[in-house]
């Protein structure tokens, strides 16, 4: 049954061919058996899962419930879950049990999903390889020596290894799409403001967005419909009706114009990855889509701008972790200053500290104008590039990441190389646009992702492109060896 | 050399909202520690602020009352610093774009002179919690009940040149926020706090001297003392050839002096930047107009009206309009007894004295405006003399009932019936022939004796005016 998608499992649950308890037990069994080799989970909440599964079965037995009732999922450990440890992948929050549910958790709970546990991630979502986690790196199910991508690497690996049919992730600069690409699954970063950030531990508030990760675009549609929607507790959340995303799937692509930004196919792109993306474009062309070359001239500025804005916001967002009220506190602080310095010094890992320092620097008096203010100006230019592009095309296509999954340890000593693995994903965050990554083949046995960027709130259109592509291809049904 | 002090004030006003500026927790004062701090106030991971609309309306209200421009778009910024009572490691405040821009406040000085004090800006921000050092061995405790309480900080221009002016400004602003009902103005509970920027310069100089900031002075009296101390200290320092150091100082009321606060080795860099969790505050003209509709008559306008309408002098009008409650009280009394001057005298005299003695607010007074009005009516219709009215006032204050009931119960009705008084006078004249003779011989001082006799005979109830008239006639 672990071979089935959420849509298929929903059918079995509805027909009574399968109970949620059976399904939950099967997945929990796989996690017990296979996760030790992956390290995709920080916490597995078996007991709560079985209770939730029983409740879901009871709802189903009354003939009630929706498509997600009884479906097991996992939450990235950045979403607060009431009564369950919420660590953000950090020693700082290793002892933190959230007293409340994040909005996304609340919504998915309300639709009857069964949470199996919390997935591993880069510390405070800062990383592209899942190697910055205090709980150790996650292994890529396709190649144990390879990274799963990050920061939502635990969710991506768990879905790819069929430890769970769907999971949540968060995406600040590519943290849903890049691991989805590297693990051969589908992942969607919604429009900024589509999904409430309430209860999602902040990394960079103006960029963070929660979204679904699953094997197919159709499953993403089911999950997104539950996750999206207005929440007055998040002032940046947009009050706009949530469409039935699954109902929009299957529409013909004959009216679709695809833009191919030349900047996404230049230097730095792995040749094999490039070939696979072009092959994917051919599939869509055969389905009737028009293809047009476009330019996003400020693309080269996205990474530098991101590494000013994201650390600036992070440096402030992470100030609350001071050892005073919750989280890690150093042993026997001598005084207040000592408590701050050692609690933060010992509680945060190297990458987090690096970004706090960068962020503190760019906000400092005398540097603010040159860095933060300038970066905000360039951010607007990057957004304007997209606004102009969407006057001519409906979606923008390109690779999700420049290379397939790299090896563990390969880039840990070179932060800039690591940062460049998000070169194609960051711009969508800076602009606030929705973007999808779907499997598009394999290079040297490792998965490659196709990225589809859409206009604001055009999730339906992105999911439809993904769905139509997946109807023509079978990359998304391939199972990593050993996880059949 | 003559020195001119230059003073600007930053006043923090706690808004009287039910809930905090960015959370739904209560702002009530005095609850057990940390019982009014929700997940948002505690700065838990993942929480987000949501702006309290009421706080925005109150800020707009104050801006309008200060004759200030209201920014159609203003921005919250984070002020970053570490402190145990600051849960997020930053305070949400406003920096470059405050809600309220340039405005002004007129203050009245001795001799009826009015002076206009410029307002630089007023912005919204959240309060921090409290660190508690007493009662805990070896540790500092933190109470976050106050964290997230909405504040407006009003920054004045350095337009004041004496402690007296500064206090007048502070009192005027205090009166204004209470008029507007946007703050309880309770200084003991910290609802109205003042930081004073003080410098001195040689009289006639344009350039400002180096200033010091005296923090958190929480009473009018202390502000006056702190500023005067600071002015004197700076003048002495400069006259001795020294220089004023720009620093933050604290006022110690016990020793009546200011002292430098412990300074950090480095200057604070608050790394202000726009808060990405909050959208800019958009204030459309319609909202401004809506708030303008709710503005009450403001103290200056009310004072002018009292002078015009009730023909009171400037002093009485000022005193009566210091608080909206007193002004309203006065107007009810005046309307009822139809004598504004009488109403003003009683409100500012007997009533104010009684309140002061009992340590009560006007709202807590046992005598309502209507009750006082009824009492004064009986003076006006000659039922009571002023002296007896004071006794009745006291009885009312002590809860013995309404004026008319007390008058009836005690038989206090003033005797104005001339035939009854005439009869008493005849008896007294007959009983005191010697005194009558002396009076008639020119010893006019004896008039007092006769009046006293009549009053005694009438048990104090004879109308003194009528007694005087009749005695003169008979004698």
Image (cartoon, grey):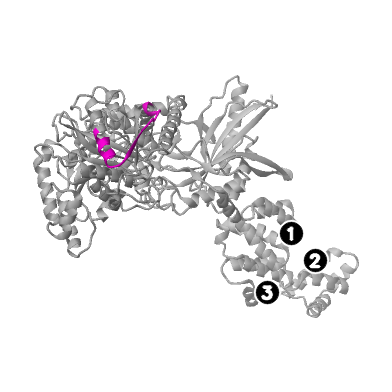
Q: Is residue B360 visible?
A: yes
Left or right, A124 with respect to B363, comes to left
For marks 2 and 1, the one nearer the N-term is 1
Residue drawn at x 76%, y 58% as measured from the top left: B311
Q: State the residue at coordinates (23%, 60%).
A: A65
Mark 2, secondary structure of its residue: helix
Image coordinates for residue B257, horizontal then vertical, percent: 54, 34
Residue B154 visible in the shown view? no
Q: Does the CB distance between marks 3 and 1 fall below 8 Å?
A: no
Residue sitting farthest toward the top: B241
Residue annotated with mark 2:
B448
Give the CA distance from mark 2 to mark 3. Answer: 22 Å
Q: Which chain hosts label 2?
A: B
Instruction: Mark 3 or mark 1: name the one nearer the start of the chain.
Output: 1
Q: Is residue B236 above or below residue B114?
A: above
Q: Is residue B443 above or below residue B250?
A: below
The label number, if any, that marks residue A137 in the structure image: none
Q: Which residue is mark 3?
A: B412
Q: Secondary structure at mark 1?
A: helix
Q: Quadrant of the C terminus of chain B?
A: bottom right
Residue B68, position as x, y percentages in the image: 61, 43
- Total numbered circles: 3
- The mark lying in front, picked from 2 and 1, is 1
Q: Quadrant of residue B356?
A: bottom right
The residue that mark 1 highlights is: B309
A299 in the magenta segment: yes
> In this picture, is B331 found above or below B408?
above
Please give the range of residues in magenta.
A279-300
């Amino acid at each position: 049954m672990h071979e089935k998608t959420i849509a298929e499992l929903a059918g079995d649950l509805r027909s009574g061919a399968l109970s949620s308890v059976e399904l939950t037990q099967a997945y929990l069994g796989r996690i017990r058996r296979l996760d030790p080799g992956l390290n995709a989970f920080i916490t597995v909440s078996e007991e709560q899962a079985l209770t939730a599964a029983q409740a879901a079965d009871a709802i189903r037995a009354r003939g009630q419930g929706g498509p997600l009732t009884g479906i097991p999922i996992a939450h990235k450990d950045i979403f607060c879950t009431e009564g369950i440890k919420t660590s953000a992948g950090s020693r700082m929050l290793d002892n933190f049990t959230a007293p409340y549910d994040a909005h996304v958790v609340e919504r998915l709970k309300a639709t009857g999903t069964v949470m199996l546990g919390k997935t591993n991630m880069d510390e405070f979502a800062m990383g592209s390889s899942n190697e910055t986690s205090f709980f150790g790196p996650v292994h890529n199910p396709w190649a144990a020596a390879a990274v799963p991508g990050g920061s939502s690497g635990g969710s991506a690996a768990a879905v790819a290894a069929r430890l769970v049919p769907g999971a949540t992730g968060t995406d600040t600069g590519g943290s849903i799409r890049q691991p989805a690409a590297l693990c051969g699954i589908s992942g969607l970063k919604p429009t900024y403001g589509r999904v409430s950030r309430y209860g999602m531990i902040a990394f960079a508030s103006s960029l963070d967005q929660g979204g679904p990760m699953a094997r197919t675009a159709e499953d993403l549609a089911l999950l997104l419909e539950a996750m999206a929607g207005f929440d007055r507790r998040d002032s940046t959340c947009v009050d706009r009706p949530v469409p039935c995303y699954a109902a929009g799937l299957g529409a013909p692509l004959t009216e679709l114009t695809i833009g191919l930004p030349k900047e996404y196919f230049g230097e730095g792109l792995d040749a094999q990855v490039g070939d696979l993306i072009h092959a994917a474009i051919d599939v869509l062309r055969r389905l009737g889509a028009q293809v047009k070359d476009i330019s996003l001239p400020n693309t080269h500025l996205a990474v530098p701008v991101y590494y000013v804005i994201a650390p600036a916001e992070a440096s402030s967002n992470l100030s609350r972790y001071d050892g005073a009220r919750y989280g890690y506190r150093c042993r026997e602080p001598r005084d207040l200053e000592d408590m701050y310095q050692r609690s933060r010094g010992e509680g945060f890992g190297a990458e987090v500290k690096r970004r706090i320092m960068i962020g503190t620097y760019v906000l400092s008096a005398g540097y603010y104008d040159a860095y933060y203010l300038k970066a905000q100006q360039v951010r607007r230019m990057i957004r304007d590039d997209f606004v102009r592009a969407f006057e001519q095309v409906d979606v923008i296509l390109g690779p999700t990441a420049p290379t397939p999954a790299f090896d563990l340890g390969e880039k840990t000593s070179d932060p800039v190389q690591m940062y460049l693995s998000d070169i194609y994903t960051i711009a969508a965050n800076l602009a606030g646009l929705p973007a999808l990554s779907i499997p598009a083949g394999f290079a040297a046995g490792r998965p490659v992702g196709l990225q589809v960027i859409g206009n604001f709130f055009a999730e339906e259109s992105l999911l439809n492109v993904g769905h139509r592509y997946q109807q023509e291809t079978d990359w998304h049904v391939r199972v990593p060896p050993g996880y059949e | 050399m003559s020195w001119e002090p230059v003073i600007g004030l930053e006043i923090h006003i706690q808004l009287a909202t039910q809930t905090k500026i960015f959370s739904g927790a209560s702002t009530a004062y005095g609850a057990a520690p940390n019982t009014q701090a929700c997940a948002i106030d505690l700065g838990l991971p993942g929480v987000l602020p949501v702006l309290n609309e009421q706080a925005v309306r109150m800020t707009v209200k104050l801006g309008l009352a200060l004759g200030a421009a209201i920014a159609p778009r203003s921005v919250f910024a984070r002020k970053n610093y570490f402190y145990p009572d600051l849960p997020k490691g930053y305070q949400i405040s406003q920096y470059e774009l405050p809600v309220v821009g340039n405005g002004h406040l007129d203050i009245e000085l001795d001799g009826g002179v009015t002076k206009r004090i410029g307002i630089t800006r007023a912005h919204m921000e959240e309060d921090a919690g409290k660190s508690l050092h007493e009662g805990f061995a070896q540790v500092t405790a933190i109470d976050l009940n106050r964290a997230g309480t909405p504040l407006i900080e009003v920054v004045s221009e350095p337009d004041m040149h004496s402690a007296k002016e500064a206090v007048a400004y502070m009192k005027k602003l205090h009166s204004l926020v209470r008029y507007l009902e946007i703050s309880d103005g309770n200084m003991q509970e910290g609802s109205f706090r003042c930081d004073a920027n003080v410098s001195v310069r040689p009289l006639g100089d344009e350039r400002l001297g180096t200033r010091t900031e005296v923090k958190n002075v929480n009473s009018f009296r202390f502000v006056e003392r702190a500023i005067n101390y600071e002015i004197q200290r700076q003048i002495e320092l400069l006259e001795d050839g020294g220089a004023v150091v720009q620093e933050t100082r604290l006022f110690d009321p016990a020793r009546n002096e200011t002292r430098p606060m412990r300074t950090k080795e480095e200057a604070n860099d608050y790394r202000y930047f726009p808060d990405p969790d909050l959208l800019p505050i958009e204030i459309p003209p319609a909202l401004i107009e809506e708030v303008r509709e709710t503005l009450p008559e403001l103290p200056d306008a009310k004072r002018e009206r009292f002078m015009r309408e009730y023909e009171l002098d400037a002093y009485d009008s000022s005193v009566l309009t210091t608080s909206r409650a007193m002004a309203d009280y006065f107007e009810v009394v005046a309307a009822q007894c139809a004598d504004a001057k009488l109403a003003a005298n009683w409100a500012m005299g007997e009533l104010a004295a009684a309140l002061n003695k009992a340590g009560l607010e006007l709202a807590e007074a046992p005598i309502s405006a209507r009750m006082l009005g009824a009492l004064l009516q009986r003076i006006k219709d000659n039922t009571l003399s002023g002296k007896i009215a004071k006794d009745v006032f006291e009885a009312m204050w002590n809860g013995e009932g309404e004026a008319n009931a007390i008058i009836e119960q005690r038989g206090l009705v003033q005797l104005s019936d001339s035939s009854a008084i005439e009869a008493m006078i005849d008896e007294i004249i007959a009983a005191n022939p010697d005194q009558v003779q002396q009076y008639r011989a020119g010893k006019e001082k004896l008039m007092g004796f006769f009046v006293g006799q009549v009053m005694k005979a009438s048990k104090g109830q004879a109308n003194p005016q009528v007694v005087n008239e009749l005695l003169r006639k008979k004698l």
